Image (cartoon, helix red, strand yellow):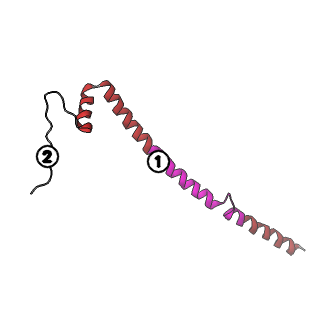
Amino acid sequence: MRQRTTYIVLFFAVIFALFAMFGNDSYSNLSRLRDRHVAQTEYTAEIQNKVQQLQKKITGIQSDDRYLERYARDELGLAGDQELIFIFDDEQE
């Protein structure tokens, strides 16, 4: 009788272990979710960095006329009064 009880307890322990490893709330699912969380945390840090850079640009454009002028020249290809823009082809024959 004692041996039978041991087998029953062992059987349920194995069943429990299998459910823990392969069930809906399994260890593999938890591991995958942790990896996903790490990836999302890294992505959030990248986005926050981009937001900070854009906020610096906005502040510079709103408060500093020289910054606005430099941005207009470099990014938009604009010229000031009395200025000419020369565009050269990189091709050499």
Does the magenta portion include 58? no
Give the SS element for disc 1: helix
Magenta segment boundaries in residue numbering:
18-45
Q: Nearer the viewer, residue 26 or 13?
A: 26
The kind of residue on which mark 2 rests is: Phe
Q: In the rendering, at what x and y percent does residue 88 appear? A: 13, 46
What residue sits right under mark 2 in the picture?
Answer: 88
Quadrant of the rendered structure where residue 32 is?
bottom right
Q: Nearer the viewer, residue 12 or 78?
A: 78
Give the SS element for disc 2: loop
Q: Name the residue at 13% across, 28% down.
A: 82
Quadrant of the rendered structure where residue 16 is?
bottom right
Q: Name the residue at 27% across, 38% down.
A: 75
What residue sits right under mark 1 in the picture?
Answer: 43
From what the image shows, is residue 89 above or below residue 17?
A: above
Q: Nearer the viewer, residue 73 or 12?
A: 73
In the rendered image, the residue lying farthest to the left is 93
74 left or right, relative to 24:
left
Residues under labels 2 and 1: Cα distance? 39 Å
Q: Are marks 2 and 1 in contact (CB under 8 Å)?
A: no
From what the image shows, is residue 42 above or below residue 12?
A: above
> Which is the main secondary structure of the residues drawn in magenta?
helix
Q: In the rendering, at what x and y percent does residue 91 appear? A: 14, 54
Quadrant of the rendered structure where residue 65 is?
top left
In the rendering, which numbered label is found on residue 12? Answer: none
* Earlier-in-chain disc, 2 versus 1: 1
